[in-house]
Image: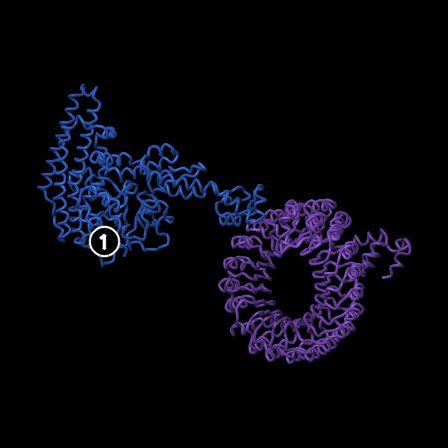
């Protein structure tokens, strides 16, 4: 068994991490502060110093809030019995803290309103105020989610107790596998997380899926390796009898979510657990221990895992479980690729032929490698990139024959010349392809992203993506740690649509 | 044929109508007599033109006129020997008889100057074209194949060693000529499985297919096996094909009659068994140099082919006596067996074999070192119909063995005794075989004039005589040959060092002589060469390497008389630029010339001589040192005309 790779480091706090990860997207509509220009965060500190005083205690408090949270989680882990173990008192104190916090923000905003006239000629101060508000609200969101997150394991436990046949609640592994994906069940429970519940349920599913793909470690890691393309979209080769496997269906948001690992402290998202672990080092020494940095080894599970397959949420699709000839998808990666290929806009257009469109950047890259090199031409005018395809076409149609371009006649006579011509004709394609990938890698490493970005505007989706990755992994260590992490947190949400396209 | 009678007067034409003339002409078989016929008068010429179906053109200058004359009736045209044939010449010649062509077969083998334009003109001018031979035209590629594909009626196409041909060209032919029945793509190294697949899908009428030396895999055989009419499949040296591929041929269509898998390293008995199982009427099986030992199962499977199998070639195997016995029992109708370079072939084995296969006509025992006179006695005893016996390097055989052969096998036409310890007595025994056409006595250094006298005594039909390194042979022996064997075409006298100009003078009465090899006969001078040139005017190949006394005078004579000379080796001769220029300039057929170590010829001499050759040369052998001394323009020009230059890496000693 290959060790699990993509599980969050805090194996016990999965539910809370899942809630965290949900925050950027789901709370976004409820936040009136999004319109604030996040660039303001960069410049202001002078005037809003008095307000900044709130921050340090807040941070410690929030840490304190996480404390008990974690305890419950670990308790949950160690205690096999599926009792309702969330603490209402703790919840209440959390909520009251949040209330207090909201009041503080209200005060700040009020003061902004009251001094509106003064601010008119003091833009800097206004910006500082806005920055403060943004930071505070971010904390509120995080804490709200984490508070709500404490509820989720209980929901699961409750379901477990009603459905004992499905799995053993004590096993952490099991616990996450068995969570049903149906939104409705999750939504019945707490009023506090009502706004979140559908998302919460889905998020659970997402985490589960990523776990699962981690378990099946033979699968390529979906996001990190854009060249790996799951061509067969699933399990066309295997014939599992219906019912012999578990079917999981994720919602569109989950499938298109760019990140699956989120920092519990700042909320930043990551594609890989390892990256998250690296990121966590910046949050304190306790994350620097070898144990925390080590890859979480998978608990030896003796009992065989139930086979899990995935269903596409698109009703009517053959990959949807309602379909008569339902063909399930094998892995989460398959789901992602299938959904993007079949049900999403093809927003990537080949820069060379201007006609071929793709919804997955890796597909575009693969195409661009061969685009313009359709040197296999049929007498009917159809072009092919591969000789066997042309010959298959010729075999199929009466009277069609491979065409020999007139100007290549000389070249084709001798084989060595032909090879030379092939090489030379291939050169432009190769070099462009090389440049393309070269640019992106360059962008990811060059500090001055903007300049490079401007220089190669045509690759904007990729570069934007690259700079996002770059920003997210590197900025937390900068001098503006607090504000920057806030920024990146928001950026994750606001850039979501772009990343959705930009990522695999 | 009484020439005088024909020439007597024109009144003959008054009494003999054209159809009667044609009737007479049909009874004139010899080409030289026909030539005389043509020269009688216009009426005779017309009759001949109406009767002629095939034409072999030797000179380019004559091409256009000949084709104009024969356009209406000609069916087979051989341009393989036509020098300096290029697209323009071919197109112009074909234009002469535009619209009239009934040509079915065109041979352009080694016509390296012909490209796609010429072939396109050919395909356009000859709507009835059925067979084209482009083998050894190394420049032919996809474009040429595409031009040829316009001839939709093509049934036979030979593209051996068309090095530029790829799958695309093959696909063109396959699509353009769906009626194709015979196809040879031997040595077209660029062709792959994909091309063969398409060929098999498009040309379902293929009967004969040669895919030797291609880099194809079993996949190709899978598609080849779908050809229901395939009779003859050659796949010599296809090292990527193994038993799994041959199993595809076990398709039960029973169409194959001939299979050649020789030199296919990965083929074993089991693959051949599946072929035999699938094709019960197999007549010809060549499995030489595949695998070392014959499996008993394979030998017993030969019983399935009991009635049909006539040719079996087992070159390079370890064949023990029991195996030959089984073959003798199972293959009663065998006409030809090849045991060349087989180990462990013994007298006992051969006796067992011929005891079963009494119909054997051709027996190849080359390099079967263990054989003695007993084997020949057995062969002579059983195989009364024997026509061809190859005994090269069977050193234990003596004259006595040939006594049996000469007594019993009176139909013997060909015998190879190269490197056997024969003496003149053996020639006496062989002289009983009046049908003998080919006699190879190379390295039999005990053969002397006496032996040649025996051969000449009953060698009227002898065509090929090989006396390579028969040191004892002198001018007297040649005199006997020249009087007794008038029909000799190929004569090899290499290193028969006692021969002088006198001997060559005797030989000059051999009018049929086409190929004369005099390498290392160092006593001969230009006088002898002049005599040969005078007498043997049909000479096409001449080897004078190391004939140090031959000088310009000899070349002048050759240039003047042997107008058909196509191939000449003048290396190490004492010729000067003058003679060389004259020879290359005046011989309109010369296409292959070897000019190594002509120490008396300066660079300018080579330059002007090669320019004088006027693009007729197809093969040229020169010293590497000249490569940078000759003008690049000349070399480019030669290559543009389709000449391949072989540079010999030896020290260059030129006169300043």
Residue A243 location (% of width, % of height): 29, 54
Q: Which residue is mark 1?
A: A297
Note whether B565 is above or below B150 in the view shown: below
SS for tag 1?
Answer: loop
Q: Is residue A491 left or right of residue A420?
A: left
Colour displayed for chain A in the image of the structure: blue
Instruction: Identify which residue, A208 or B452, lies in the foreground.
Output: B452
Q: In the rendered view, tell whether residue B303 sits above or below residue B26.
A: below
Q: Is residue A374 visible?
A: yes
B640, above or below B465, in the image: above
Q: State the image quarter where residue B420 is shown.
A: bottom right
**Residue in view at x 10 percent, y 44 percent:** A87
Q: Which chain is purple?
A: B
Left or right, A49 with reference to B262 = left
| Residue at mark 1: chain | A
Residue B6 is situated, as x and y percent measured from the top left of the image, at 88, 57
Q: Is residue B94 left or right of residue A228?
A: right
Q: Few, some or many C-alpha atoms within 10 Å of disc 1 (few <14, some 14-19, many ≥20)?
A: few
């Amino acid at each position: 068994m290959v060790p699990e790779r993509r599980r969050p480091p805090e194996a016990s706090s999965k539910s809370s991490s899942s809630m965290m990860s949900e925050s950027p997207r789901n709370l976004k509509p409820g936040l009136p502060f999004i319109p604030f220009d996040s660039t303001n965060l960069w410049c202001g500190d002078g005037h809003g110093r008095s307000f900044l005083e709130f921050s340090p205690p807040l941070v410690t408090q929030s840490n304190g809030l996480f404390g008990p949270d974690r305890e419950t989680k670990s308790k949950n882990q160690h205690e096999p019995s599926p009792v309702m173990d969330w603490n209402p008192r703790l919840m209440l104190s959390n909520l009251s803290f949040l209330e207090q916090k909201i009041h503080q923000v209200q005060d700040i905003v009020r003061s902004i309103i009251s001094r509106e006239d003064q601010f008119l000629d003091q833009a800097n101060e206004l910006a500082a105020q806005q920055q403060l508000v943004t930071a505070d609200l971010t904390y509120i969101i995080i804490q709200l989610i984490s508070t709500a997150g404490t509820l989720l394991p209980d929901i699961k436990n409750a379901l477990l107790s009603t459905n004992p046949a499905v799995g053993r609640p004590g096993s952490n592994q099991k616990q996450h596998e068995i969570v049903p994906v149906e939104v409705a069940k999750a939504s019945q429970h707490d009023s506090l997380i009502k706004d979140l519940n559908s998302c919460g349920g889905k998020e659970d599913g997402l985490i589960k899926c990523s776990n699962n793909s981690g378990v099946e470690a033979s699968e390529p890691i979906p996001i990190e390796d854009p060249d790996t393309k799951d061509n067969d979209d699933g399990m066309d080769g295997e014939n599992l009898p219906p019912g012999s496997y578990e079917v999981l269906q994720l919602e569109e948001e989950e499938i298109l979510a760019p990140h699956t690992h989120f920092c519990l402290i700042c909320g930043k998202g990551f594609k890989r657990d390892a990256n998250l672990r690296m990121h966590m080092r910046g949050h304190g020494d306790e994350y620097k221990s070898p144990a925390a940095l080590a890859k979480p080894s998978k608990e030896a599970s003796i009992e065989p895992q139930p086979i899990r397959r995935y269903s596409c949420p698109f009703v009517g699709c053959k990959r949807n479980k309602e379909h008569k000839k339902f063909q399930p998808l094998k892995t989460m990666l398959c789901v992602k690729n299938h959904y993007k290929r079949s049900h999403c806009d093809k927003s990537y257009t080949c820069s060379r032929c201007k006609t071929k469109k793709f919804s997955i950047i890796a597909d575009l890259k693969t195409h661009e490698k061969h685009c313009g090199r359709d040197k296999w031409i049929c007498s009917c005018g159809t072009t092919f990139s591969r000789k066997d395809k042309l010959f298959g076409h010729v075999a199929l149609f009466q009277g069609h024959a491979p065409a020999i371009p007139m100007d290549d006649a000389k070249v084709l006579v001798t084989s060595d010349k032909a090879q030379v011509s092939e090489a030379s004709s291939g050169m432009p394609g190769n070099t462009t392809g090389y440049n393309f990938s070269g640019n992106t890698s360059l962008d990811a490493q060059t500090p001055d992203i903007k300049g490079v970005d401007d220089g190669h505007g045509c690759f904007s989706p990729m570069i934007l993506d690259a700079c996002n990755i770059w920003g997210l992994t590197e900025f937390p260590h900068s001098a503006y740690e607090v504000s920057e992490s806030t920024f990146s947190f928001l950026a994750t949400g606001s850039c979501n649509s772009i990343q959705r396209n930009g990522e695999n | 044929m009484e020439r005088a009678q024909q020439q007597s007067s024109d009144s003959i034409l008054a009494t003999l109508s054209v159809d009667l003339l044609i009737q007479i002409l049909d009874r004139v078989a010899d080409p030289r007599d026909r030539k005389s016929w043509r020269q009688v008068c216009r009426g005779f010429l017309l009759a001949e033109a109406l009767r002629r179906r095939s034409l072999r053109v030797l000179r380019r200058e004559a091409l256009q006129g000949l084709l104009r004359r024969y356009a209406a009736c000609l069916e087979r045209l051989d341009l393989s020997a036509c020098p300096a044939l290029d697209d323009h010449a071919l197109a112009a010649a074909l234009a002469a008889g535009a619209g009239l062509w009934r040509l079915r077969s065109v041979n352009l083998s080694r016509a390296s100057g012909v490209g796609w334009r010429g072939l396109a003109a050919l395909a356009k001018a000859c709507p009835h074209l059925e067979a084209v031979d482009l083998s050894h035209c190394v420049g032919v590629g996809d474009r040429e194949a595409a031009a040829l594909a316009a001839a939709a009626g093509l049934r036979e196409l030979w593209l051996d060693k068309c090095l530029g041909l790829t799958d695309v060209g093959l696909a063109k032919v396959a699509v353009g000529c769906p009626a194709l029945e015979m196809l040879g793509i031997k040595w077209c190294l660029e062709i792959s499985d994909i091309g063969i697949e398409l060929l098999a899908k498009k040309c379902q009428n293929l009967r004969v297919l040669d895919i030797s030396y291609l880099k194809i895999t079993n996949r190709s055989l899978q598609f080849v096996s779908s050809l229901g009419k395939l009779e003859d499949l050659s796949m010599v040296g296809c090292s990527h094909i193994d038993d799994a591929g041959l199993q595809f041929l076990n398709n039960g269509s029973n169409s194959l009659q001939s299979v050649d898998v020789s030199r296919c390293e990965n083929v074993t008995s089991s693959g051949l068994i599946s072929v035999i199982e699938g094709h019960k009427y197999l007549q010809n099986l060549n499995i030489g140099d595949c695998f070392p030992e014959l499996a008993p199962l394979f030998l017993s499977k030969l019983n399935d082919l009991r009635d049909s199998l006539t040719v079996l070639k087992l070159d390079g195997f370890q064949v023990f006596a029991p195996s030959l016995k089984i073959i003798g029992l199972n293959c009663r109708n065998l006409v030809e067996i090849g045991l060349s370079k087989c180990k462990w072939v013994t007298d006992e084995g051969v006796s067992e074999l011929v005891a079963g296969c009494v119909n054997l006509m051709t027996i190849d025992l080359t390099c079967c070192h263990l054989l003695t006179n007993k084997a020949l006695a057995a062969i002579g005893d059983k195989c009364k119909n024997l026509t061809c016996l190859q005994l090269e390097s069977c050193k234990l055989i003596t004259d006595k063995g040939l006594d049996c052969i000469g007594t019993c096998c009176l139909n013997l036409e060909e015998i190879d005794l190269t490197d056997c310890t024969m003496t003149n007595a053996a020639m006496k025994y062989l002289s009983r075989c009046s049908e003998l056409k080919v006699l190879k006595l190379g390295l039999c250094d005990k053969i002397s004039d006496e032996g040649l006298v025996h051969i000449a005594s009953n060698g009227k039909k002898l065509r090929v005589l090989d006396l390579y390194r028969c040191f004892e042979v002198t001018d007297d022996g040649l005199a006997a040959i020249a009087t007794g064997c008038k029909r000799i075409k190929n004569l090899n006298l290499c290193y028969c060092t006692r021969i002088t100009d006198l001997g060559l003078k005797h030989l000059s009465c051999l009018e049929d002589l086409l190929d004369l090899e005099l390498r290392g006969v160092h006593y001969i001078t230009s006088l002898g060469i002049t005599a040969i040139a005078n007498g043997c005017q049909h000479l096409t190949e001449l080897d004078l390497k190391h004939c140090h006394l031959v000088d310009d005078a000899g070349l002048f004579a050759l240039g003047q008389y042997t107008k058909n000379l196509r191939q000449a080796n003048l290396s190490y001769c004492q010729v000067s630029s003058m003679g060389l220029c004259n020879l290359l300039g005046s011989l309109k057929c010369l296409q292959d010339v070897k000019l190594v170590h002509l120490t008396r010829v300066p660079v300018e001499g080579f330059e002007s001589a090669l320019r004088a050759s006027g693009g007729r040369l197809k093969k040229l052998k020169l010293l590497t040192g000249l490569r940078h001394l000759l003008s690049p323009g000349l070399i480019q020009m030669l290559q543009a005309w389709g000449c391949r230059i072989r540079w010999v890496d030896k020290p260059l000693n030129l006169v300043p």
